[in-house]
Structure formats: structure tokens, C-alpha cells
Image (cartoon, grey):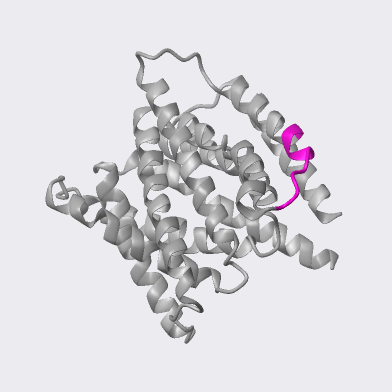
Amino acid sequence: MQSNHTKNILGLLLATFFISTSGVLGRYIEMPSEVIIWFRSFFAMLFLGLFCWYRKLNFKLKSKTHKLPFIIAGIFMAAHWVTFFYALKLSNVAIGMLSLYTFPVMIAFLEPLFLKVKFKPIYIVLGILVLFGLYILSPDFTFENTTFQGIIFGLVSALCYVIRILILKSHVHQYNGVMLMFYQTIIVTICLLPTLFFMDISGIKTQLPYILLLAIITTAIGHSLMVYSLQFFSASTTSIISSVQPIFGIILAFFFLSEIPTTDTYVGGALILATVVIESIRSKK
């Protein structure tokens, strides 16, 4: 039992690390956000589809009633990705990822409404701890600068992410995690298809290797592992443990984009990591 719990925690942290690469790639790839997300979803869809076919997974929905929730979740997935990339491009990796990570607080309050589970006061404490860490990490804001605009997009992205997770939470026990992501990427690809006709897509010629990394490592593998982890933890637990993602993103940005962390980054990051440790111990009990 103990080894299974440790394995599940490590799997969730690995998923978090893979997903955190989206920060660096989102900042680095020189294409419109909507176009990046379309190619990301398209190539991830192909990879996931081939994997499902190789594993001989059943592509059929278990119930017709699942169709509408999956479509809605896919639409929110598209909105989450696009707004997050806007946040990255308007600010930087640290601000974009940290503004997104207000979602543990959002999910703690919304989970009882969506899933009718009992609200746990401990999530308020842990959520406040995460928020305090984000507050220390964040710079001063004014309405006139792009950093503030990036934070707004990050908050919208967080809300879309929360709604998508809570919609899927009711179905993760019935479907393979890879299959769920395959459905999601199909919907995102369809939703953003019109952007190819009125936005500049010429950058794909030089940006293709990075798009493929984003599609396969970040999206296909990372998000499939994340959805799979929802089987073992509540949505609130998953969100709080995965709050280490900004730390991974900041470290990657330091090495690949030369974005140097400040002292506040270390202090705020330590508080976020503390919530990961606390929630890991609490969820084990």
C-alpha cells in the first residue's frame, strides 16, 4: 500500500514536470498562441491515436451521455491553453505559470459544487499558503503594463483548467487516461481549426521541432499522466501537489531562456514546495 502511494505521488510529480515544459516552449516558439495550440493539439492527437490503436483500446464512448461533458471539457481545454500562452508571451515564464497556479484555491471551493464532495477546511489553509508563496514571487502590478495583462490571462486560464478537471473527474474511472486526452485533443483541434485561415502559420517551417516537443512530451505524455493521477487523488489533492509545476518551469526558464530567479522566487517557491510535502503526507493518511 505504501509503495503504491509513493509510486502514484512520483507519477503525479513526473506528469507535473512534463507539463511544466509548456512555459519555456510557449515563450520560445515564435507563432501566434492560437496557431501554436492548434499544431500542439493536432500532433498530440496523432500520437495519442496511434498509441491507443497500438494498445488496442476501445475508441467508443461507454455512454452517449458522456459526449456533451467531453465536448465542453475540450472547449475549456482549448481556452485554458490559449489564455495560458497569452499570459506567457505578455509577461514571462515565472509570472505566467504562477498566475495560473491560483487554481488550487479555485478548485478547493468549486469541487464540492461540481462533485458534491464534503468541503475540507485544510484546503483553505493550504490554498492560502500557496497564494502567499505566489504573492512573494509576484512583482508590483499596474493596469498599464503587460505583466498585469499576463496575470489576468493566467487567472482566466486557471479558471478554465479548474472547470475542465472537475468535468473530467466524474469519468476518469471509466476511461483510460490516454484515451481521455485523445478525445480532448480532437475537440481542441476542431475548435481552433478556423485560426489556420486568418493567422500567420509560416513559422511552422522553423518551429516544428519545438512544436513536436510540446505536442508529445508536454501534451500527450504529461497530460495523460495527469489525468491518470486523478484516479488516485481528489481534484484538490492533485492540484495542490502539482503546484510544484511553477518551480520546474522557473528552473527550466533559467537554463533555456536565461530568466534569472530572484530571492523572492526562492522564498515563494519554498512555500509552494511546503504545500506539496504537507499534502503528500496528508493524502497518504
> Residue 72: horizontal and vertical position, in percent?
42, 57
Q: Is residue 202 above or below residue 58?
A: above
Q: Residue at x 78, y 62 (%)?
A: 5
Q: Residue furthest bottom?
A: 56
Q: Position of residue 47 (x, y in %)?
A: 38, 71
> Looking at the image, is 120 positioned above or below residue 223?
above
Residue visible at 40% across and 22% down?
Answer: 147
Where in the figure is residue 191, as x and y percent of width and height?
28, 56
- Asked which quadrant contains residue 93, the reply is top left
Instruction: Please say whether residue 205 is visible from this viewpoint.
Output: no
Query: Which quadrant does the N terminus fall into?
Result: bottom right
Q: Residue at x 71, y 52 (%)?
A: 117
Left or right, 1 with reference to 176? right
Segment tinted magenta in the rendering? 117-125
Along the line of sight, which residue is nearer the eye, 190 or 246?
190
Q: Quadrant of the C terminus?
A: bottom right
Most foreground residue, 155 or 121: 121
How many marks the image carries: the answer is 0
Side of 161 where 279 appears, left or right: right
> Is residue 240 within the magenta segment?
no
Residue 240 seen in the current view: yes
Res 258 → quadrant? top left
Q: Is residue 185 found left or right of 133 in the rendered image?
A: left
Residue ID at (26%, 54%): 192
Residue 276: percent from left, percent from top: 72, 43
